[in-house]
């Protein structure tokens, strides 16, 4: 390997051609990089104009150019593959074309053209001194051949930007010394020219130079790695498999490579997105000297990409039910489920499962996410949940994939709410405040479509949005309704009811409905095409009982729309309930605990514990307070009768009287005391 510092003039002149190999990324410099290039050119131009001592000042170091020689052709053309430096070299060529096009002197135009841009006597592709990759090639050819209007890609954009800078410069200075500008570029932008030996592995050198991935995407690095291992079949692999895959997936290609990695399991499910290339290096290490095996790997990857394309764009999926399920998952607006969905579609594509099995699997994924949202489960660990599930499913064989997936998602550690938990959660959770507005609309649309009746709404025909029946900003009339329904504190009742599912609907008349009383809203909703709104139109009142009743009906409908997990209750799960019941029953008089301490004691999720206490009349649950000793009014058994609840706490000695808002910390049961109670001491 030879390295020397030299001028661009030395590199560009003579019968030479620099080709950008297939494994290189496309030309990707943007205005930020063009501006840096132009700033360096302007600075050197000023020095050339000044002449004399100014020319002794340091030149601009433009970076390195690493090239690998290709066998000389019979014509004597020296050909090289550019291993590193294509962005700098391509930008320089675009600038030299702009310089040629703006230079008025015909002889100088021709000299620039023949000295730096073309090999005059060569034919075909050999005529061009720079030959970019397939995606950029037509752009540069159009520029060199004088058809700049046909250069519509990234290189064409660089040419137009640089041309504009030259024109602005001419307007600013009145004239440009083009000879000085030429010298500034070809003699004062210096590079380190590194020419490898013909026997060196160019791909390996590229990999070494970019081992940190700095400036390169995981796709760029992985693309090179594959072709490094395909010395005789690189062109075939690129044209037949890799290029179609990248073209088909477009911007999804980066995410696909991560999804494909984690979906294969065997420990890969924990690989972060910025470590995909490192993982693939490990995977390919065992076969890197077997070119046929590497080629087969590329084939398999391209086939997996076809399945992934259906996950992100299901329009071309053949089976109607599978297409519908994928479309709904896409509508949900998240990609956390992709690792499992890729497994589903890959198995369907390969004939390992039937379409019905695939459709049920996708429905289970939808149900898992929707049910968790409806009971207010945080999404922060959902990504890991699905990658873990994908890893578990990777080794499953047979045609009962949907049943196995349902079983995996039903395990207690993943928390897929059952019917009881779902109904209880819908009754109290602030649906309007959970996750994204698009996902809340998705749920209401699905519930609307599930209601009896042949008519299905055209969701694109109107701009539907979420609407509170009882408004967020209650008027005096709404407060009066709550007072008349027996609420002790209408303001607290409003806060408890306002965002629950039973009080939320869909409408295209949101701005018109506003904070109007129920009667006026009913008049406006008479024209609504949604079955969700029929009950609202017909009700005589809208208070806690009405909202609870509507919420219950929607919850029962949700149970039908989104399948429940399998019942995985076992002896161990029964034990924690026994422990909890015993501890709460035998709490010393006047003492209290928290959901967090009880969850730690029983080793179950906070959500699971809360839902169990909500749906089961466990003696002693009234003594569960917040950690600071205040009453948790979000708990259903508290909010349903706050005054009565306070009276119970007074009777049990937790607080002195009903005016007290905070129980003493001295009466909070310590975790070690809870443990002794659990052991029967």
Image: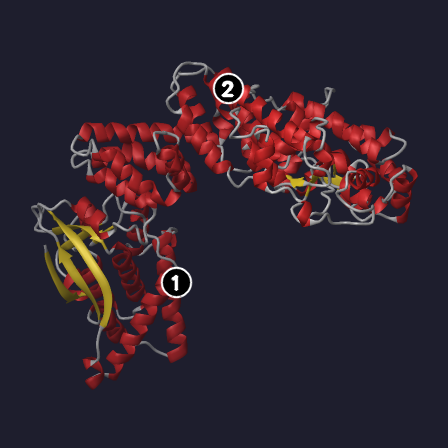
Q: Is residue 167 left or right of residue 238?
A: right
Residue toward you, 295 or 517: 517
Residue 504 at least partly seen: no
Residue position for label 1? 32
Q: Can you tell which quarter of the image residue 442 is in?
A: top right
User: x, y (%) of residue 405?
Assistant: 48, 22
Front in this rendered view, residue 350 or 71 = 350
Q: In the rendered image, which residue does mark 2 sit on?
A: 319
Residue 516, horizontal then vertical, whole percent: 86, 44
Instruction: Locate the C terminus by quadrant.
Output: top right
The Cα atoms of the two marked residues, 1 and 2, are separated by 47 Å
Asked if the residue under mark 2 is in contact with the one under mark 1, i.e. CB atoms within 8 Å, the reply is no
User: Residue at the bottom extreme?
Assistant: 53
Q: Secondary structure at mark 1?
A: helix
Q: Which residue occupies 35% across, 27% down?
A: 303
Q: Position of residue 392 (x, y in %)?
A: 41, 26
Tell me if mark 1 has few (under 14), some (14-19) or many (20+) residues whose alpha carbon lies within 10 angstroms of its own: few
- Which badge, 1 or 2, is on the more N-terminal residue? 1
Q: Is residue 98 something that shows in the picture?
A: yes
Question: Along the line of sight, which residue is nearer the eye, 430 or 334?
Answer: 430
- 678 is higher (above) or lower (below) than 140: above
Q: Which mark is residue 236?
A: none
């Amino acid at each position: 390997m030879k390295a020397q510092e030299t001028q661009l003039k030395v590199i560009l002149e003579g019968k030479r051609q620099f080709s950008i190999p297939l494994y290189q990324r496309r030309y990707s410099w943007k205005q930020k990089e063009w501006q840096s290039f132009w700033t360096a050119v302007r600075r050197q131009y000023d020095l050339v104009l000044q002449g004399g001592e100014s020319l002794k000042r340091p030149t601009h170091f433009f970076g390195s150019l690493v090239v690998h020689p290709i066998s000389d052709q019979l014509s004597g053309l020296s050909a090289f593959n550019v291993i590193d430096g294509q962005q700098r070299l391509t930008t320089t060529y675009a600038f030299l074309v702009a310089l040629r096009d703006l230079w008025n002197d015909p002889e100088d135009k021709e000299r620039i053209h023949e000295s730096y841009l073309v090999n005059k006597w060569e034919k075909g592709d050999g005529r061009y001194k720079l030959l970019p990759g397939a995606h950029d090639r037509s752009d540069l050819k159009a520029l060199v051949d004088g058809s700049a209007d046909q250069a519509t890609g990234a290189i064409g954009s660089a040419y137009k930007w640089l041309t504009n800078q030259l024109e602005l410069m001419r307007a600013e200075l009145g004239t440009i010394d083009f000879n000085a500008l030429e010298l500034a570029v070809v003699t004062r932008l210096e590079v380190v020219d590194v020419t490898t030996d013909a026997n060196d592995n160019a791909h390996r050198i590229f990999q070494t130079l970019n081992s940190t991935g700095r400036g390169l995407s995981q796709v760029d690095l992985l693309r090179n790695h594959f072709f490094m291992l395909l010395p005789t079949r690189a062109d075939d692999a690129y044209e037949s498999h890799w290029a179609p895959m990248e073209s088909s997936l477009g911007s999804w290609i980066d995410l696909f490579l991560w999804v494909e990695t984690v979906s294969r399991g065997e420990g890969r499910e924990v690989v972060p997105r910025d470590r995909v290339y490192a993982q693939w290096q490990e995977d390919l290490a065992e076969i890197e000297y077997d070119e046929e095996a590497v080629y087969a790997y590329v084939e398999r990857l391209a086939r997996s990409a076809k399945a992934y394309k259906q996950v992100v764009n299901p329009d071309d999926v053949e089976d109607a039910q599978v297409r519908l399920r994928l479309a709904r998952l896409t509508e949900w607006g998240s990609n956390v489920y992709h690792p499992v969905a890729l497994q589903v579609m890959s198995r369907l594509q390969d004939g390992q499962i039937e379409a019905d099995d695939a459709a049920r699997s996708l429905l289970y994924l939808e149900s898992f996410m929707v049910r968790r949202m409806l009971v207010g489960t945080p999404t922060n660990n959902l990504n890991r949940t699905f990658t873990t599930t994908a890893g578990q499913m990777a080794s499953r064989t047979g045609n009962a994939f949907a049943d196995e997936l349902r079983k995996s998602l039903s395990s207690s550690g993943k928390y897929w709410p059952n019917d009881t938990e779902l109904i209880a959660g819908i009754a109290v959770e602030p649906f309007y405040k959970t996750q994204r507005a698009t996902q809340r609309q998705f749920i209401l649309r699905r519930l609307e479509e599930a209601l009896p009746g042949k008519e299905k709404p055209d969701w694109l025909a109107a701009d539907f949005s979420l609407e509170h029946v009882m408004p967020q900003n209650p008027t005096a009339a709404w407060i009066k309704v709550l007072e008349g329904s027996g609420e002790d504190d209408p303001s607290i009742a409003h806060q408890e009811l306002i965002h629950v599912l039973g009080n939320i609907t869909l409408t295209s008349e949101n701005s018109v409905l506003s904070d109007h009383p129920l009667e006026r809203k009913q008049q406006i909703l008479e024209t609504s095409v949604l079955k969700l709104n029929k009950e609202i139109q017909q009700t005589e009142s809208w208070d806690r009982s009405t909202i609870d009743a509507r919420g219950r009906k929607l919850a029962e409908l949700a149970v039908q729309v989104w399948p429940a997990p399998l019942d995985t209750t076992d002896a161990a799960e029964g034990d924690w309930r026994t422990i909890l019941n015993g501890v709460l029953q035998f709490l010393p008089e006047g003492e209290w605990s928290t959901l967090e301490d009880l969850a730690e004691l029983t080793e179950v999720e906070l959500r699971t514990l809360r839902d169990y206490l909500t749906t089961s009349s466990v003696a002693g649950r009234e003594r569960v307070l917040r950690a600071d000793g205040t009453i948790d009014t979000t708990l259903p058994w508290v909010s349903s009768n706050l005054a009565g609840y306070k009276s119970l706490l007074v009777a049990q000695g937790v607080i002195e009287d009903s005016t007290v808002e905070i129980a003493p910390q001295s009466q909070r049961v310590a975790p070690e005391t809870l443990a002794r109670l659990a052991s029967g001491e």
